[in-house]
Image: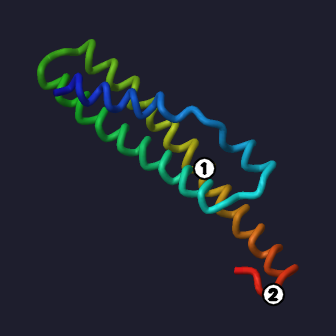
Amino acid sequence: MSRILLAAALLALVSIADPTGAALAQQRITSSDLEQLRNKVDTQRDAYHLLDMAEKEAREEGAQERADAFAAAKAKAREQYHRFNAELKKAQVQKTEQDKRAAQGNPDYK
């Protein structure tokens, strides 16, 4: 079971490789951009919880080496979660400001 959890969690960590952050600062932020960032935050949160369960299971089985590997991957997932969450918050602020500027220039803008 823990091997399946590890594979799923590692896939979640590896599958998130497209650029964000600086790229968003140089372009118009869309609802789709925000949704992608939300998905990354959710994926990292889920990976963290899966890795936590796998680490606990490995410790209960006495597999210290596996537990250590899960702990390291869990720390990476937590780090990525915080990074993407910060990017999401920043993008949300930028989107709000962007929408305000657009509304000032066009009263019919929604």
Left or right, 103 with respect to 88, comes to right
**Within the image, what quadrant is residue 58 found in?**
top left
Q: Is residue 58 above or below residue 29?
A: above
**Within the image, what quadrant is residue 31 found in?**
bottom right
Q: Is residue 57 above or below residue 83?
A: above
Circle 2: residue type: Pro
The answer to which of 76 and 94 lies nearer the viewer is: 94
Q: What is the total number of numbered labels drawn onto the structure image?
A: 2
The disc, 2 or 1, on the residue closer to the chain's N-terminal end is 1
Outermost residue on the right side: it is 105
Q: Residue at x 84, y 82 (%)?
A: 106
Circle 1: residue type: Ala
The answer to which of 88 and 72 lies nearer the viewer is: 88
Q: Position of residue 70 (x, y in %)?
A: 32, 24
**Within the image, what quadrant is residue 89 found in?**
bottom right
Q: Position of residue 102 (x, y in %)?
A: 81, 74
Q: Nearer the viewer, mark 2 or mark 1?
A: 2
Q: Position of residue 44 (x, y in %)?
A: 44, 41
Q: Is residue 4 above or below residue 44?
A: above
Asked which secondary structure carries label 1, the reply is helix
Left or right, 3 with respect to 79, comes to left
Q: How is the image coloured?
A: rainbow
Disc 1 residue crowd, few under 14, some 14–19, many 20+, Cα 10 Å: some
Q: Which residue is mark 1?
A: 86
Q: Position of residue 19 (x, y in %)?
A: 66, 37
Disc 2 residue crowd, few under 14, some 14–19, many 20+, Cα 10 Å: few
Left or right, 65 with respect to 105, comes to left
Q: Residue at x 77, y 86 (%)?
A: 108
Asked which secondary structure carries label 2, the reply is loop
Q: Which residue is mark 2?
A: 107
Query: Looking at the figure, which quarter contains the C terminus?
Result: bottom right
Q: Residue at x 23, y 22 (%)?
A: 3
